[in-house]
Image (cartoon, rainbow, N blue to C red):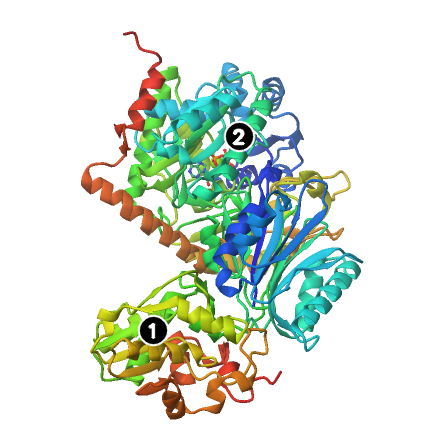
Amino acid sequence: MPGLVGFYTFGEGRENWDASHFIHYGLSALQGRGQESVSLAVIGPGNALHTLGGKGGVEDFFEKNGTGIPKGFIGIGQTSSYVDDHLVHVKAPYELVLALDGKTDLHENRGEASKLFARQFSQLLHSEKEPLKATSMLINKIGGGYSFVALTHKQELISGRNPLGVKPLETGSVGFDIAVVASETCALDVMGIDHTGPVETGEVIMFTPEDIRGNAPAADAGNFCSYEYVYLARLDSKVNTLPVATVRNNIGRELAKAHPAKADVVIGVPETALPVANGYSQEAGLPQELGFVRTGENIRAALEPTQKERLVGVQLKLNPVKSAIEGKDVVLVDDSVVRGNTLHNTVLNLKRNGAHQVHVRIGSPTLISPCPYGVEIPPRDELVSSSLNEKELANNVGADSISFMTVDELQHAIGLPRQNLCMRCFENGGATR
Amino acid sequence: MRVMGVGGGAREHALAWKLSLSDHKPEIFWIAENRNPGIYKICKDNQGELRTGRTTDPKTIVRSARGWGVDMVVVGPEEPGFHGIPDALEKEGIHCIGASQELSIIERSKADLRRLQWENNLPGRLLFRTFKYAREASDFIRKNIDTQPWLQNIVIKPARQSGGKGVKLIEDRLAYLHDDKERFKEAYFDSLQESMAAYSDIEDKILVEEKAWGPEYSLQCFTDGKTVLGTPLVQDNKSAHEFDSGPETGGMGSISGPDMILPFVTREEYDKSLKIVEGIVEAIQKKTGRSYHGMVGGQMMLTENEGPTIIEMYSRLGDPEALNMLAMLKTDIIDVFQAIVERRLSKLKLEFTNEDAVVVKVVAPNGYPEKKDKAKGHPVQVFETNIKRNGCYLFWGNADLQENGEVVTGGSRLLALMAMDHTLPPASARIEKTVSSIQLTDGWGLYHRTDIGSEQLLAKRHDSAERVRRLYKYREEQGTLGRRMEWVPKVGKVDPSQLLLKEMRGPEKA
Ligand SMILES: Nc1ncnc2c1ncn2[C@@H]1O[C@H](COP(=O)(O)OP(=O)(O)OP(=O)(O)O)[C@@H](O)[C@H]1O
Ligand SMILES: [Mg+2]
């Protein structure tokens, strides 16, 4: 799952801005969405499109490429959780570079589906006179769940969110000179840009040397990804105008109400589950302790690509604070369970270090179906909850009890109507793959 | 009686409209650089005529005024004032509503305005410096940015009001983007130095001032030099696109009402703002020895250091803010002008509707403001019955009526649509329903801001007002309002206001 940034400038002196430098910091903020590959495209003097891509995290990419980073005054960039996931560059009939979060339904394979989308996009921009109309037609025609930013050879930056609106996209601006779109508002903050609002579902916002244009958004509110609130988005972001931090606190409170446990302390699994544990502690009236200290980089375990790396990641990451757990009954709060390894390790770790009972409470329903829109939730046979029930899972990870939120409880905690939330990964028959 | 107007924008169309509604039934004559279709029609319907000519040329204006034998002239835009049109008319014994050349310095020179505020210890001011050369400006910032942290977040402006040169708002809060911001600033200093070299009527070329944040509003006033009468607050929107994004424009639309204040400004802030404008009128009259009669306005912002603060002064009505004010004005406009001419404003009962809120939205051709040449010359079609049916008013701006009756775009703001209602959002919605009544027949696009007057934008304004108000109120309670004090490691207490005042006084003798 990629994080996207688009950077646009106006007015006199616009050629003095260094788009790549701003995009660098925007992407840094979005690394939670993926840090396996980075790529960017800019337009500088002479109007040529320059692109560059590479493996690894954002900092690495910019450091390694140093002066080889293309310079320009407008541009787009993406950081992705897929290895070798790069911008799609279509040269003809209408040159454009595309960064897409999510998945179109043009092909089984996400990468291929994005390529086909980019080609059709280029065709339509070429055949239709009005690029805004062309883009609007395109996103209404091509299904799936996706958001995108694209840069054309005519210095147009086109951003959009398909009518389903699964994937987030936000806009911002500063002064009279700069406008930005990004997957999450935290990227705007880090770039020093004021948030102006979301790109609405079915909306296209297009920046050109002449103006900013937009079409009328879809009348339907959309079907927002609930996993953004559970795990994907950064705590300091707003997603679909809801602050993620508030939602995670609500999730914790809802969890405490519906799934109480007899214990002495509440401990969250860093990082994502800490605010959930906080909500649980506030609602349950139990103290929250900081139970783990992390060593090394923040590796987001759920999205780690291979099992071996993941085990290493988890053990390196979490060293228990023994005095916080010794001799205590613990409520261990986590955001979600994918394969169950993280949980297994963590529970064992707590018990080996002197915790008595460990009651696991999960701030989301059981993950049982892969995501049809490209979030790398593994295939069904790798999802522990699709094979084991709560009791079996508790035994498997060595916990005294384990319970998940229900779909209704999660919906209630987020506070959006059920029909406006995508919960396909928590439901049977979501997607096959 | 015969009245003549000067200027061809939406503001002047609104002035002509208001004159045509007067019980004095004036004959209406006009001079503008373009054949504004709205003004053209009003003149024709009121026994007058619209003539095109250079509105900044005193000879042209005086000749026409004399030729037509007018009793009074109303000057709309600022440039005629800068060029001494009112002075030339008055020398001929023709009454003029408009600030004379010397007085209009409060708008012409943003640097002189700031000096006036600091010399007279007037509230509502911002820290500033002026420079003649780009190098001076960048050196000053580099040298002082650590001891005077206000230099991190600045606004760069041409020190003289100059067509085309915009302001740059630059916040330099993030260490990792410092070099980017510095490079941009320095390039803009260079560009300003170059383009300002053409203006010989002013010493300073570059103005750097403290960047404030908070909601903006305009307070337009009538004055006869002795009395300053405030009118309802109006908020203009400067950015070209939705939710304050995109390039700076002359103003994309404005809101006012339903009373004298805006929903996010307090009565107390109104009174303070009026005091601030009065103070400036008094100070500039004292400095020049001239009497100010005409319109004056403060383009204001609520700021954390000062509360109500002057961003710039108007020596005229705002465009589009004039439309809101004139729509709300209940008193006969000729009575207002006569009271100004006869210096008896203190006796005038100036009345405004308190029932209606007013929303104005500017419609501009694509290309404005960055590519005006592309925005120019497109034929316009208007479905007037539709506009009337929705209860909206149309005021022509930068449009030109051709000999064949066709109207074409001039490249700048084409026209403004206005609607009134009990509150702002329904008025805004009415305009949204109406804008499609205006089209360019050659297929070129038009745009406007849908968000002006909407609940969403009002909520955003309200939020920003509340946040900045908490800050300045805190200062008020602590007795530090208007003061700027820093503590700098190894240096100690630094008062940037004192440093500014010291520099303004010039090198002192030991
Ligand atoms: N000191 C400041 N702090 C924050 N914003 C500012 C400051 N000065 C100017 N601005 C912003 O820039 C806009 C334009 O500034 P200003 O009015 O001084 O310039 P201008 O070119 O004369 O504009 P216009 O004549 O169109 O009103 C203001 O409306 C305000 O939004
Ligand atoms: Mg201004």
A5 relative to A111 in the view: left or right: left
Q: Is mark 2 on a helix, strand or loop?
A: helix
**Residue at 65% of width from left, 72% of height from top?**
A110
Q: How far apart are marks 1 and 2 (CA)?
A: 48 Å
Q: Which amino acid does label 1 sit on?
A: Asn
Label annotation for residue B186? 2
Q: Do the residues labelled 1 and 2 touch (CB within 8 Å)?
A: no
Is residue B417 visible in this depiction of the protein? no
B50 relative to A359, above or below:
above
Query: Do the residues at pointers 1 and 2 share their chain?
Result: no
Q: Residue A406 carries which label?
A: none
In-image side of B344 versus B74 (left or right): left
Neighbour tally class for label 2: few under 14, some 14-19, many 20 plus, Cα within 10 Å: some
In this view, the residue in front, A324 or B128, is A324
Residue at position x 72%, y 44% in the image:
A47
Query: Quarter-wise, where is residue A72 in the image?
Result: top right
- Answer whether residue A121 is visible to the viewer in this image: yes
Residue B435 higher or lower than A334, as above or below:
above
- Which secondary structure, mark 1? helix
The residue drawn where x is 49% and y is 77% is: A421
> In the orientation shown, which residue stands out farthest toward the top?
B509
Give the residue type at disc 2. Glu
Residue A257 x %, y %: 28, 82
Residue A60 vs B298, above or below: the answer is below
Query: x, y percentage for residue A20?
Result: 58, 47
Residue that numbered label 1 is attached to: A250
Q: How would you rate the neighbour count of disc 1 (Cα within 10 Å): few for under 14, some for 14-19, many for 20 or more?
A: many
- Say which quadrant the C terminus of chain B sits in: top left
Q: In this view, does A410 lie to the left or right of A283?
A: right
